[in-house]
Amino acid sequence: MKRVLVVDDAVTVRLYHCDLLKTAGFDVCEAENGVEALEHAMQQPFDLMLVDVNMPKMDGYRLMCEVRRQEALRGIPIVMISTEQEEQDRQQAYAKGANYYLVKPAEPELLVNIALVMTGGSQ
Amino acid sequence: MGLKKSTDKTDEPQDSVSFEALVELLNHGSMAEKRLAARDLADHPNGRSELILALQNETDVAVLEAILDSLQQHFDAQLANDLLDYLRSENVFVRNEVIGILQNYPDFVGPHILALLNDVDSDVRIFAVDILQLLAHPDTPQWLLSVIKDEQHINVVAAAVDRLAEVGTPEMIPELQALTERFPNQPYLSFAVKTAIHRIAEAS
């Protein structure tokens, strides 16, 4: 079973994404900011990280930077997800190392399909 | 330790670096010099405007942290006003830190909330709701309620629903339920409304 780390400071968003991914057959772990996410990622392997941009303590871009800096973590695909929908937001995410950028609220099917593609296929 | 003029006469008292030199170091020094300059400018009468300006161009997180720490040492209404401009910053770190700082000053931020919730930029409206998450202000529930009644942008509404799940009261449930009719075919919002109602009911 593929493991996904869902990172978002909004409880409801986190619950929703976890719920969708669990229903699709993923093993899901959650974190409410970048610091917590990094701690999880150092302790256990993940096949994908779904990361919000705007979070307290450590935002999504700083988290991505840390993940890409560490050899043990840098191969984890990262899907950034944000309410910001300008092309420059998308470009910024890709420039900083995101594998995909989703705008909230993401369509459930799209979110699951992206997770499937990023983790290498069906559960 | 603050920045000091270098001198060969080590037994003589060292003068503090001039304001102009501190500003120069803040903008063009090494990372360590920038951090120290930011710290030393905190107590200078004209330091604030330079620190605020430096937020625009600085990209190093450690320096930005030093600048924001210095600014907070003398928080007042004008600083709240100045920091609110940074909700429009493209620098995610600055924006999030500013949100975190503003949450601590309900008396200075409260008078700006309605304007922020009516800003033309939906991102700014979302950040206003984010401020409300931890703003200990008696009007917070009512401000959030006004968002779910009047706001048209789904992400602003969704952010408000998420916050109302924490501070909402049972009499707000009908307004939450009405959202699913106002935004049909929005699975996330339906989920958020159900979750909020469940959490409000549990807490009451």
Image (tube, coloured by chain):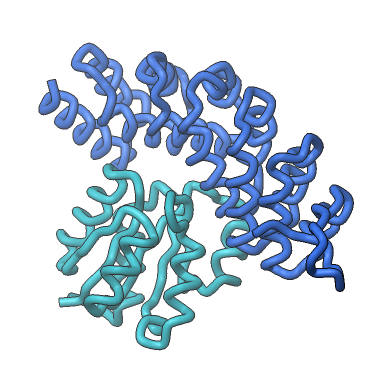
Chain colours: A cyan, B blue
**Camera-side residue of A85 and B96:** B96
**Camera-side residue of A100 and B12:** B12
Q: Where is residue B98 in the image (x, y as percent from the top left)?
A: 56, 41
The residue at 50%/64% (across/down) is: A62
The residue at 44%/58% (across/down) is: A58
**Camera-side residue of B44 and B172:** B44
Q: In this view, does B165 lie above or below A66?
A: above
Residue at the limit of the structure toward the front, as seen here:
B11
Residue at the limit of the structure toward the bottom, as seen here:
A71
Q: In this view, does A1 lie above or below B187?
A: below
The residue at 52%/38% (across/down) is: B101
Tell me how many marks there are: 0
User: In the displayed structure, does residue A107 sit left or right of residue B29?
Assistant: left
Quadrant in the picture for the N terminus of chain A: bottom left
Quadrant in the picture for the C terminus of chain A: bottom left
Q: Position of residue A91 (x, y in %)?
A: 61, 65
The residue at 69%/43% (across/down) is: B42
User: In the displayed structure, does residue A39 sit left or right of residue B55?
Assistant: left
Question: Which quarter of the picture shows residue B49?
Answer: top right
Q: Position of residue A5 (x, y in %)?
A: 28, 66
Q: Position of residue B162 (x, y in %)?
A: 32, 35
Q: Is residue B199 above or below residue A14?
A: above
**Camera-side residue of B181 and B87:** B87
